[in-house]
Image (cartoon, rainbow, N blue to C red):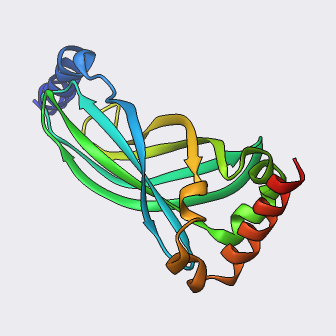
Amino acid sequence: MYRRIAFFLLLVPLTWLSTGCASVQPPTAVVRGADLGDITGDGLTLKLDVMVSNPNAKALSIGRSSYGMSIADVRILQGETDTPVKLPANGSAPVMVPVVIRWDELFRVKEALVKTGGNVPYKIDGRLGIGSGLPLIGKSSIPIEYAGTLPLGDALTDPMVLLKSRALRDLAAKILMGLRQN
């Protein structure tokens, strides 16, 4: 009798795993673009617009996400942020990932900023944390990548922003001196 119960208790999960889990698929993410957000005396925020698709019959949640940013092949920052978004079953949802860049982090690539007049190409990579509750996916993450141009030239022409940050004033002076020498 106990053998039959034990066999039954093993058979049900195995049957479920062999039929239900074969169709579990990882979510996908596409970065649709990036917009310049707040510009303050401390730095600026770049907002990544990511569309995440969930091909599964169960809703998923996105939680903690990580990112890194490189300018001129120099890694200038790494960070994490909470991106609480519920992905509908068999659907998609936009996720906004804020990338916070401090002015002093940009000093590490001042030569590239001078060469480009402040509008410098960048690359961002990272991972969106997924908490699924689904077998075989569990807690995982989705990779994201994006490349664009950071429009610092615009920030450097705003006198109110320049007044708030000594680091930005120094950066602006170096960029402007570099432009005059070229």
- Taking the spot 89% from the left edge, 53% from the top edge, the residue there is 181
Residue 126 position in % (x across, y down):
53, 44
* In front of the other: 136 or 145: 145
- Taking the spot 76% from the left edge, 42% from the top edge, the residue there is 72
Residue 8 position in % (x across, y down):
13, 25
Q: How many marks?
A: 0
Q: Is residue 16 above or below residue 117?
A: above
* In front of the other: 81 or 41: 41
- Taking the spot 76% from the left edge, 61% from the top edge, the residue there is 176
Left or right, 64 with respect to 132, comes to right
Residue 143 position in % (x across, y down):
48, 35
Left or right, 18 with respect to 160, comes to left
Q: Is residue 158 above or below residue 8?
A: below
Q: Which residue is at the far front? A: 180
Left or right, 157 with respect to 132, comes to right
Q: Is residue 17 above or below residue 109?
A: above
Q: Quadrant of residue 174?
A: bottom right
* In front of the other: 19 or 98: 98
Q: Quadrant of residue 27?
A: top left
Residue 16 position in % (x across, y down):
17, 22
- Taking the spot 65% from the left edge, 70% from the top edge, the residue there is 103
Q: Is residue 39 above or below residue 99?
A: below
